[in-house]
Amino acid sequence: MRRMFLWLSVVAALGGTAISDAQQLKKVARIGFLASSSSERVKSRLAAFQQGLRELGYVEGKNVIVEYRSAEGKFERLPEIASELVRLKVDLLVVEGAPAAHATKNATSVIPIVIGNAADPVGTGLVASLARPGGNITGLSDFNLGVVTKRLELLKEIVPSASRIAVLWNPTNPTNPLQLKETQAAAPGLGVTLLSLEAKGADDIERAFSAIRKERPGALIVIGDPMFGTHQKRITQLTIKSRLPAIYGAPESVDAGGLMSYGTNFADLFRRAATYVDKILKGTKPAHLPVEQPKKFEFIINLKAAKQIGLTIPPNVLARADRVIK
């Protein structure tokens, strides 16, 4: 009788597990995806995230539903959109850009949040540390703070005569002041001074380029920001019109006509973000998943843009490019 009881107990336990697994498989996960940038700019990052989900067995409309939202570079809209996604009772939130990450953090301390990209999530207060993020947030850092010095160095290589370099940045983005500070720290060692230009919106961008025409700096750094991404076409047009060598943080700006970019491979980050989603949906707490840093960086040069401003790219710099637009 005792053996029979034990056997029945095992069968019941296994049966319960099977039922539980079946219920889990039948459950359709609901994910909220919030972008700080415009829908156009985030297109390739979203496609990479979707590809990552498919590789892990998630099929939209079958076992996962993704609610897509974008602030279109208007950060003031983010709190409202984040609250809307929370009200939808999504199982998890995926965010593009630090502004969206902060908006979702303020909107919920319960729903897990996966950062697709954000510079210095520790320094901006998103997580306690990379190894032990704590709370309900984890994901990927795009390491912008570690590459801003490299961008300044690359500008000096292609324009050695540049003794004054303009920096376009958005003070409403929590990561931008940190990136500006690091750029300022690196400038004296490269023999340059910086012209700081703030821009919170489209009108400020126009004013910034009016200042550039007046001050005549030798080159320009556009610090990575979703609002700048939304207006990337206009920014690249203004740099070409000003015949100003410029470097950006994202490849989309070079594809839009900019001269060159150096930074994280964002598609790789968002493909990896799907792995976090998978682990969290299977029960792992965000606090137990360390924030990871980029594994791939890319340097892109646009020779068409160089020709438009009458600039010759040194062969040794050209040889280091991961992609060249001709």
Image (cartoon, rainbow, N blue to C red):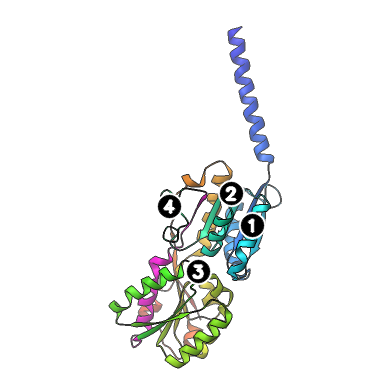
Please say whether residue 139 is one of the residues in the magenta stretch.
yes
Question: Dot 4: within a 10 Å radius of its alpha carbon, few (fewer than 14), some, or many (20 or more) residues?
Answer: some
Question: Dot 2: within a 10 Å radius of its alpha carbon, few (fewer than 14), some, or many (20 or more) residues?
Answer: some
Q: Nearer the viewer, residue 8 or 301?
A: 8
Disc 1 to disc 3, how far (Cα)? Answer: 19 Å
Q: Which residues are magenta?
A: 136-163
Q: Nearer the viewer, residue 266 or 220?
A: 220
Q: What amino acid does circle 3 point to?
A: Asn
Residue hosting label 1: 83
Q: Position of residue 68 (x, y in %)?
A: 66, 60
* Furthest-right residue in this view: 61
Q: Position of residue 107 (x, y in %)?
A: 59, 55
Q: Nearer the viewer, residue 242 or 135?
A: 135
Q: What amino acid does circle 4 point to?
A: Ala
Foreground mark, 2 or 1? 1
Residue hosting label 2: 111
Q: Residue at x 48, y 66 (%)?
A: 174
Question: Dot 3: within a 10 Å radius of its alpha carbon, few (fewer than 14), some, or many (20 or more) residues?
Answer: many
Callout 3 secondary element: loop
